[in-house]
Amino acid sequence: MATREALVHQAEIATRLEGQACTQVSVGVHHSLIIDFGELQPAEGDQLSGELILAIDCPWRIDAPDVPVVGWEDADEDIADLATVLIGAVVTEVEIRRPGFDLFLQFSNDHRLRIFPDCRAYYHDELASGALPWQIGGRALTESLRES
Amino acid sequence: MTIYAFEAQKSWLPTAIGMTCGGVEFDAETATLTIFLYTPKLERGDASDEPERAISIHGVWRVEQEDAILAASGDLHDPLREAHLDRLVGRELVRADVSHPGFDLALHFTGPFIVRGFPCDSLQFGEDPPEGDDIFVSWWVDGIGVPDDWEEPNEAFYENRDR
């Protein structure tokens, strides 16, 4: 699947996050953020994984109503600590803004996650990076694929 | 007191509206994009080299034209970056939006082109910089009559707003 086509597909899947509760937040390589939604179950190794997983591999920021709480350029230890503010909160609104495919998630605790893709390669198939700025996976998607 | 620096820089943006982009530079060493702006001259040839305004964005940014992304901060080795940034030259800055609480910047040029800045270092939003650090913000305005002190606001902005 071409990168842009994959982004369009991800934008459709993103609507499934609405109504989901954040159950786990973790920091990956290069400040990437991994957010689990729904019931956690044992996965590979000692890991737990949610029903849906949002993996963010580009700049992002979590805002409280009056002030940003934590962002992509913060230190890993601060991210690991401060991003937990989302745990227990439910996604009340999902918004995708084009042409950048910026993803906005509004949470029930009045916090907002903003994702800002920052590579031209995401949008131009001829650049063929194959990478996506953010993507959604998890067993809920795998199960629905099996059912269909 | 970096949140005050953001507020002060925001107050200088209206002074650049109506100016025309005369050049765009990306400094890879400091990861800073700078847009140079000039007032249109009635007579050609009398423009000084010094831009009247320069708006700089450090860190994360993106340049959009309608439904396309022309350039972005994450493309470290994009051979077309310079050519795409040059498409801003000759365009007029018609609007500058700052959205809160993150001081996200959107510079709207004729074309239409939009240059976006996305601050994502939460330390910038404190009342004081971290111990041992200088005041820092992700975007700022320079130019003729603009003070070097990032926390010094454009008083005229507040006078006009309060009228």
Image (tube, coloured by chain):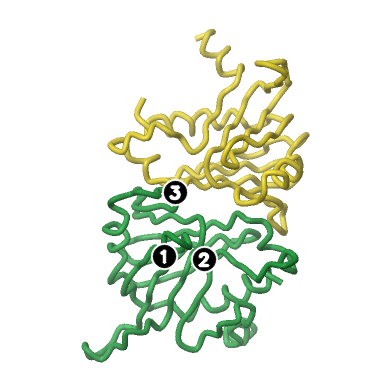
Note the chain letter of the yellow one. A
Q: Secondary structure at mark 3?
A: loop
C-alpha separation, residue under disc 2 versus residue under disc 1: 8 Å
Label 2–label 1 contact, CB within 8 A: yes
| Place of residue A85 in the rendered image (x, y in percent of width and height, measured from the top left) | 76, 42
Kindly identify the amino acid type of the residue bearing the numbered disc 3. Gly
Relative side of A148 to B125, left or right = left
Q: Which residue is mark 3?
A: B74
Residue drawn at (44%, 49%) of the image: B74
- Which quadrant holds the N terminus of chain B? bottom right
User: Which picture quadrant has residue A38?
Assistant: top right
Label 3–label 1 contact, CB within 8 A: no
> Within 10 angstroms of label 1, few (less than 14), some, or many (20 or more) residues?
many
Question: Are tags 3 and 1 found on a single chain?
Answer: yes
Kindly identify the amino acid type of the residue bearing the numbered disc 1. His
User: Which picture quadrant has residue B126?
Assistant: bottom right
Position of residue B31 relative to residue A3, above or below, is below
Q: Give me the disc on residue B97.
A: 2
Mark toward the start of the polypeptide (2 vs 1): 2
Q: Nearer the viewer, mark 3 or mark 1?
A: 3
Note the chain letter of the green one. B
Q: Give me the disc on residue B55.
A: none
| Place of residue B44 in the rendered image (x, y in percent of width and height, measured from the top left) | 21, 87
Residue drawn at (43%, 75%) of the image: B54
